[in-house]
Image: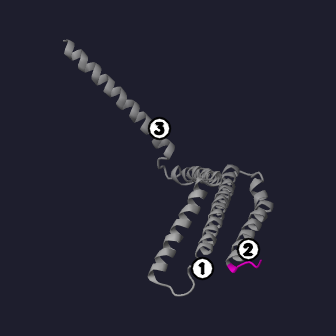
Amino acid sequence: MEKSSSESTFESTQEFFDLWVKTYQANLGRLVEMPAMGPAREKSEKMMMGFSNFVNLYTAWMESNSDLQIVFKEAMQKVREKTATDMKGDLSPESYKDFYKIWMETYSETFHEFLKSGHFANDLGKFMSRLMEFQKLNREVIEENYLKPMNLPTKTEIDEINKELYSLRKTVKKLTSQVSELSKKK
């Protein structure tokens, strides 16, 4: 069976991405794993870890995109099979309405099944995990390299202040209640 141009384009894109990931892991991935040396060792390690986290995030995103493209292609194939005979000959507005209805139902069913699958949940979980790792490291780098040197408050410091403020409010409320009770007794 001869492959269509969209099939071969998709497969060549997937092959390119797979080759890119393997090349990264074989070359740059090893550089990222090398221990840093010198006075700026900790900063260098964080920066390299940030690059690695970004690549992991990008890889998870591309894998999710690839899976969605496969589902899209599958839905398109189903629509083509369902409407191949209907779209020959004279086309009326009614036949376009029927095509639209078949198209919507087929895409909805196909994507609904994919979104319920464990594969989608696994992909989404991996992507969200990578995103959170990236955001956490990014926040740490920004705090250390920009906020602290400029004497601006960091998220950690703001969180500590909010906890302290909450505790103080709670204490004031409790003391106010006790003062109110004592003044009623007099």
Range of magenta residues: 1-5
Q: Indicate the amino acid at tag 2.
A: Ser
Does the residue at mark 2 contact the one at mark 1 (Cβ under 8 Å)?
A: no
- 87 or 70: which is nearer to us? 87
Q: Residues within 10 Å of mark 2 (few under 14, many from 20)?
A: few
Q: Secondary structure at mark 3?
A: helix
| Percent coordinates x, y for residue 26 in the rendering | 81, 61
Question: Which residue in the protein does label 1 denote?
Answer: 85
Residue identifier under label 3:
160
Q: Residues within 10 Å of mark 3 (few under 14, many from 20)?
A: few
Q: Determine the main secondary structure of the stretch shown in magenta.
A: loop
Q: Earlier in the sequence, mark 1 or mark 3?
A: 1
Residue 55 vs 35, above or below: the answer is: below
Q: Give, as a three-letter code, the residue at label 1.
A: Thr
Looking at the picture, how far across and down is residue 109, in whole percent?
Answer: 56, 61
Q: Which residue does the numbered mark 2 point to in the structure image?
A: 12
Asked if residue 62 is positioned above or below residue 135 in the image, the reply reads: below
